[in-house]
Image (cartoon, rainbow, N blue to C red):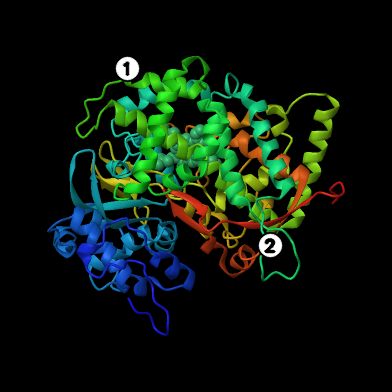
Amino acid sequence: MKLPGNYTTTLPRPNKVDDLKYGEESTFGRVAWRSGMDRDKRIKHDGFVLKYRAFTNSLLKDIDPNEAFHKSNWPHWVKQLPGPLKDKSFSDSETVLKYWLDALFHNDQHILVKQWSEKYGRNYVVPTPHFGWGKTPSLSYFLIVCNPCDHQRLAFNHVKKAPIYDGLNYGQSFLGHYDVKEWRQQRNHLMQPMLPLSIFSTMFPAIEECVSDLMNRIGKGDESTLFYGSGKPKKAFNIHELILDTTFKILMRTLIGEEDNFVNENSQSIRWALQRPDFADYEATGIIKQWCRSLLSRAQANKDNIGPLMRELIEIPALYKTTEPGHKGAIKQTHDNLAIISLAGHDTTGSTITFCLMELCAHPEWQDRCRVEIEQVFDQIALEKRGINYADFHKFENLTKCINETLRIWPAVPYGSQREFEHDDYITDIKGEKVTIPKGTMFMIPNYCQGRSTQLWGPDANTWCPSKWSGFADDCSINFKNSNPQFSARNPESPRFHPFTRGPRDCFGKNFAQAEIRMVLSHLLYNYEFSLAEPSKSQYLQNAEQIAWQMAGILKPVDGLWMHITKKSVKARL
Ligand code: HEM
């Protein structure tokens, strides 16, 4: 294809819908996002139109969105609730569906959910595709629940997941399991190694070893770069990559019990593949399958030396047989469990650590405050000649404020959870009246828009400000301060704050994550000082939200996060 001027490209470019396979590489999303192109322009762009057509052709053959979502077909509850389908600024229902899918393809659906929650009020309805678990693909309504009381009550009452998780490469894991009884059995079984006071706390020395490897890598500086445009020869590190590699190794070394060499060989490619959850992305799917097969066969060949979670995972197929229609078999289930643990067990924690460091760079006074308390705790530990333990984490009060604040405005799982009504129930409309929602309706209990809601957090909701927190507590929440020191065995949850969603189907790894985040951050801040490097610094200053994309459901700085890291010279002072 000829480009303007003298440039030519050899890149294959689809020119017909049929040439484009859904999931194919496209730089369109990146360009649109970075250029600040508005959503109206985005949905008219050729790149999106091709993708949308490929998606709907493969999934929703012969379904006309304007017909499916025609006013005359709205169920009673849809008529009673606000949402873009009723918004006159959209020309028709298909345009609304395109907005929703465009945001999904562009990895910024969390921003659209937030914008619409501000526009339409606390609970609203959007149009969406419906498929998975053997169901015939169709178009359906999706209830977005932003009223904090409804959010809390519905999350507790309806633990059944929406079937759409099945559209992902790890969709039949226990995270996405559709059969509630079977999910409960699996979860109870797998929970054993995650209980903080038993097996899990014995893993602290192994976590510290991985963190110490990270310190050495930073100290050597081999993985840094000198940007040509920078005024001084100051090394810049893509801290996100270093952190993700470390959290991946921590997970593999402790809970799975894998060897470092094997993990090192695969870390980059498997972490890349896990971000591409689409079945149509054959390359990623192949890498994930190969990884899960290898993990399983290596564990079966070396049963005496595997990690505690791996031990439980390989027992599951023999213990629980499902009769749920659409289930793809025991092997697929084990692979999906391994894939989801590989993803959720490192990426969420890694992103939280990275975003917290990013904010600490932008707020050096908090970096100093954290360092002062960390030095006090570490000096005490050195004096007592022991390793770090649970009770020490409780002394990191400022660090905890910073972590909570990061989880509030940079929640690693911005969509929260996607569920299905197990029975008829109600939600409240804008006037506080009850609206009955029928069994089988899909709903989302989002995190991102709740953490940034000005109604819930005040006018500065979008600003990172740790002093909002009184230590471990959200003023409107459980107070961890006066509880026993094993705070991380609990979910830091309040009506307006729920980064790990809500029990009983909350995050399975929350204890592990809470301890790991403190372990990594405390060592990093004890040893090094951090400041933002270009291009991340300018991106942060222009519009920090553009740094974070929702990939495979997880919020992350997709193009990396660049920092200058220098050895801490003097003890931190305030
Ligand atoms: C800061 C770190 C983390 C955050 C913010 C986080 C958040 C969440 C959220 C919001 C969910 C609900 C997802 C959904 O319903 O679709 C979830 C579920 C889950 N998380 Fe995490 N997570 C974190 C770390 C971890 C870690 C370290 C692991 C594993 C070691 C893990 C494993 C899981 C699993 C397996 C589920 C599914 C639980 C179930 O359905 O019973 N997560 N997490």
- The correct choice, above or below, for 417 with respect to 410 in the image is above
Of pointers 1 and 2, the one earlier in the residue sequence? 2
- The correct choice, above or below, for 313 with respect to 339 in the image is above
Q: Are marks 1 and 2 in contact (CB under 8 Å)?
A: no
Please state which amino acid type lies under the numbered disc 2.
Leu
At horizontal 60% and vertical 45% (from top left) the residue drawn is 243
Please state which amino acid type lies under the numbered disc 1.
Ala
At horizontal 39% and vertical 62% (from top left) the residue drawn is 116
- The correct choice, above or below, for 163 with respect to 545 in the image is above
At horizontal 30% and vertical 56% (from top left) the residue drawn is 125
Q: x, y (%) of residue 210?
A: 65, 34
Name the foreground residue: 241 vs 107.
241
Screen quadrant of the N terminus: bottom left
Q: x, y (%) of residue 21?
A: 26, 57
Quarter holding residue 317 = top left
Quarter holding residue 424 = top left
* Mark 1, residue position: 318
Q: x, y (%) of residue 486?
A: 64, 27
Instruction: Indicate left or right for 60 with 436 as reference.
Output: left
Task: Evaluate whether residue 6 shows in this view.
Answer: yes
Q: Secondary structure at mark 1?
A: helix
Instruction: Indicate left or right for 170 with 261 as reference.
Output: left
At horizontal 68% and vertical 62% (from top left) the residue drawn is 226
Task: Evaluate whether residue 85 shows in this view.
Answer: no
- Disc 1 residue crowd, few under 14, some 14–19, many 20+, Cα 10 Å: few
Name the foreground residue: 279 vs 221.
221
